[in-house]
Image (cartoon, rainbow, N blue to C red):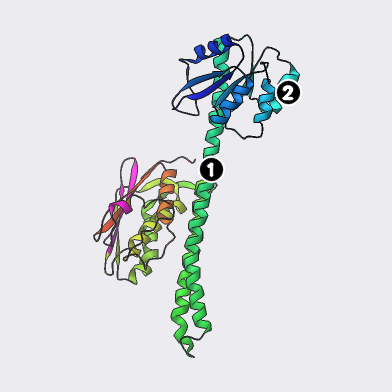
Amino acid sequence: MEPLRVLVADDEAGMRHSIARALRHFTLRLPVVDDDIGFQVEAVESGEAALERIAAAPPDILLLDHKMGGITGIDVLEQLRDKSLDMLVIMITAFATIETAVRATKCGAFDFIAKPFTPEELKETLRKTASHLLAQRQARMLAEEKRRVRFDFIRVLGHELKAPLGAIENFLYLIRAHQAGPDVAAYDEFVDRCMARAEGMRKLIADLLDLTRIESGQKQRDLAEVHLGDIAQTSVEGMQPAAAQHNISVHLEREGTLLLTGDRGELEIILNNLISNAIKYNRDGGTVHVRLKGESDRILIEVADTGIGLAPEDAARLFHDFVRIKNSATRHVLGSGLGLSIVKKIAQLYDGTVGVESRPGEGSTFRVALPRQHAAT
């Protein structure tokens, strides 16, 4: 980490030199940063010179003498008060009265150190100040990151809702204009497409609610011993109508003991998402193999398809929020782009892992490994 810049403003040459000497080889390791922190010291002899130096290049920490020839340290603080500088001020004073402390604090001083002070006292004051300064900066970075993520989330969500709403609106305009003539049955296709788009939006909202509950830690979890084979059988049976529309065969293979501690609803979400994707991104007449294997301390879930497959660069980002691979082969596939992200987050609740192997044009194999024993978090 770059050293913190310290500006010393004191009209005593001996004090300036003593501070520079004490901090020359001084380093800290603080909890807020996993690195050694050093200090680069500059010194000026007056408040006026301090203001000029700060205007040119603000330091990280200002060691400011209260009484100097010319303007005082309080005067310097008052002139800096409205500048919103990313800097903390330590007042150096031989007259540590309550009135001085109150006024300096109101003007923005972070801490005080009284003359005469030892190198150890100086270093301890610098340690507290540096810790606070870096914690402030880290908090601002996190707040900015939170704002950026929220903006990106809303932007992507707006885009994901705009497309189906636009499609529904267009079909409704066609219906209102009696585009297909007087025969009511001629509009069935328009209605079916509207309903498919509405179902897609409903799935997106459901996925968003699942994602929010998981990430906020507010999802109610009902952990018990469950049989993953039974859950998988239910998921496969529920997906058969969708598979039959494209003549896709779905096979379930079970090996070993498949009991584990888990939330049945969460495990259903994992299996439903994996099997649904294997069907949606498959080719007509293709196959899906769902394999469960019980090992000594974990259960492996493997869902393999004979579908369109993925390029390596697409596979690397597949488990992120709102990621959908868009190309000529996937243009017709509707989805929220959240299913695999939710699968990953649920697997992480179990201290499990997720992964994918895929080759374009040959299919994909998704794998989830879940420990048998899991404590609620």
At which x and y percent is residue 144? 53, 43
> Residue at horizontal 50%, vertical 65%?
162
Amino acid type for the residue under numbered disc 1: Glu
User: Would you place residue 306 above or below residue 366 in this image?
Assistant: below
> Residue at horizontal 50%, vertical 63%?
161
Q: How far apart, in angstroms, are the residues tagged by discs 1 and 2?
A: 32 Å
Find disc 1 in the rendering and name its residue: 144
Q: Residues within 10 Å of mark 1 (few under 14, many from 20)?
A: few
The answer to which of 287 and 103 lies nearer the viewer is 103
> Residue at horizontal 69%, vertical 23%?
74
* Disc 2 element: helix
Find disc 2 in the rendering and name its residue: 102
- State the quadrant of the N terminus: top left
Q: Residue furthest bottom?
A: 182
Q: Please state the extent of the stretch shown in magenta in the rendering.
A: 287-314
The answer to which of 20 and 361 lies nearer the viewer is 20
Q: Residue furthest right?
A: 99
Query: Could you tell whether 205 is left or right of 83 in the image?
Result: left
At which x and y percent is residue 67? 68, 16
Q: Is residue 369 visible?
A: no
Q: Is residue 116 visible?
A: yes
The answer to which of 193 and 118 lies nearer the viewer is 118
